[in-house]
């Protein structure tokens, strides 16, 4: 897992991206779809609204292991988070996280019996953050191509958990 400080670092990287690609296994085939964060803070668990009847729900019931990836090319931020997914029917949390964006996807409202939350408890991950401008990154790539033993230094990379 990660420390409270590291969780805050991860949250700072993904909170403005908002949409991550959720990867589940459809039998033996990885499948990704966009999911929109609904929370305002991160404590090691990510929350998303879903339809209980959605294929991703069946996929996570068969195999709870999932991966979420977030990227912001403009800021050079890339985050991959792996963990366990569960469908949660907690009316208090549904009420807490309900908002106009979510309501647009659920025209029957938050009391629709098909409305549920997908909880992802993050167990491990990796993130990358470019520290320099795109011009500097291109320079680093060109320099690495000229030197046989060099690799480009494009910024921070860190693995955690697992």
Image (tube, grey):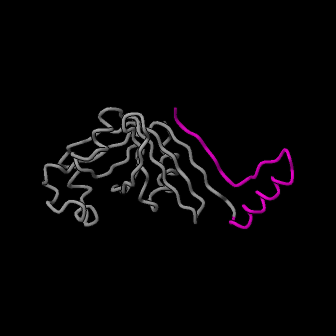
Choose between 78 and 92: the one closer to the eye.
Answer: 78
Residue 29's x, y, as percent? 42, 38
Foreground residue, 6 or 70? Answer: 70
Q: State which quadrant residue 75 falls in.
A: bottom right
**Along the line of sight, which residue is nearer the eye, 86 or 53?**
53
On the picture, is 149 further left or further right than 34? right
- Residue 141 in magenta stretch: yes
Figure check: 86 above or below 75: above
Can you tell which quarter of the image residue 23 is in?
Answer: top left
| Left or right side of 124 for 61 | left
The x, y position of residue 146, in whole percent, is: 86, 54
Question: On the rendered structure, is 139 left or right of 130?
Answer: right
Where does residue 27 sit, x and y in percent of width and height? 37, 34
Residue at (41%, 58%) from the top-left corner? Answer: 19
The one nearer the camera, 144 or 125, is: 144
Name the residue rendered at 61%, 55% in the picture.
Answer: 129
67 falls in the magenta region: no
Is 84 drawn above or below residue 70 in the view shown? above
What residue is shown at x 19% (from left), y 49% (from top)?
92
Q: Residue furthest right?
A: 147
Residue visible at 33% across and 49% down in the picture: 47
**Relative to residue 29, is residue 70 depicted above or below?**
below
Task: Tell me where the magenta segment starts and ends, as one range.
Answer: 133-162
Total numbered labels placed on residues in the image: 0
């Amino acid at each position: 897992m990660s420390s409270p400080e590291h969780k805050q670092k991860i949250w700072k990287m993904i909170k403005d991206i908002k949409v991550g690609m959720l990867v589940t296994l459809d039998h033996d085939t990885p499948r990704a779809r966009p999911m929109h964060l609904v929370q305002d803070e991160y404590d090691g668990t990510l929350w998303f609204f879903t339809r209980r009847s959605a294929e991703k729900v069946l996929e996570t019931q068969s195999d709870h292991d999932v991966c979420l990836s977030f990227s912001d090319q403009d800021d050079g931020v890339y985050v991959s988070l792996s963990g366990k997914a569960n469908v949660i029917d907690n009316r208090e949390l549904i009420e807490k996280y309900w908002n106009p964006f979510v309501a647009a996807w659920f025209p029957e409202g938050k009391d629709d019996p098909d409305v549920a939350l997908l909880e992802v408890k993050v167990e491990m991950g990796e993130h990358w953050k470019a520290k320099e401008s795109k011009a500097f990154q291109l320079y680093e790539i060109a320099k690495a191509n000229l030197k046989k033993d060099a690799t480009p230094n494009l910024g921070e990379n860190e693995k955690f958990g697992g």
